[in-house]
Image: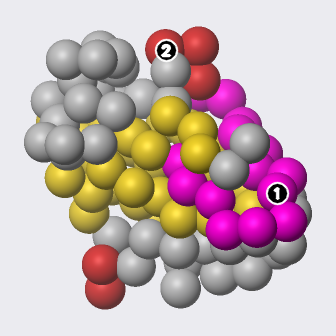
Amino acid sequence: VNMYTLGAADASKLIEMDVSIGNTVTVPANSSVGFAIGTQIMVVQQGTGQTTIAAAGGVTLRSAGGLLNLASQYSSCTVVKRGTDEWYVFGDLA
């Protein structure tokens, strides 16, 4: 699947994107999925297709340099909820 939206069952899990084309993991709005503040979810680009972390409408993603693409195959990142619709993204980003 080349588009995946995080769901309640993904809290504290590892999401592996094993795709050979560009793909997107979307962080949903709190109104759709009410993750607790502090929730952490890891994402790994298992396949050769570049994985992008995206924000649903109303969500703010904060990362160093505004980078939101995983750097290469086997790169990973962690998204951490810090506010109602605000998340940190940190890891091997490009």
Q: Which residue is drawn at 39% across and 55% down?
A: 54
Q: Which colour scheme is used?
A: secondary structure
Residue 60 horizontal/vertical position (percent) = 19, 52
Determine if the magenta segment contains residue 16. yes
Q: Name the residue beneath numbered marker 1.
A: 19
Give the Cα distance between marks 1 and 2. 22 Å
| Residue 74 in picture, x, y percent from top left | 83, 68
| Residue drawn at 82 percent across, 57 percent down | 19
Give the percent coordinates (x, y) of residue 40.
49, 36
85 on left or right of 88: left
Task: Judge the density around disc 2: few (<14), some (14-19), many (≥20) Cα neighbours within 10 Å.
Answer: few
Relative depth, front residue between 67 and 78 = 67
Q: What residue span does the magenta drawing correspond to?
A: 12-25
Three-letter amino acid code at the position of disc 1: Val
- Decide: marks 1, 2 in contact (CB < 8 A)? no
* Vertical comparison of 61 with 20: above or below: above
Q: Is residue 17 left or right of residue 77?
A: right
Whole-percent x, y for residue 28 in the image: 34, 33
Residue position marked by numbered label 2 in the rendering: 8
Residue placed most toward the observer, 65 or 29:
29
Quarter of the image for residue 89 reads: bottom left
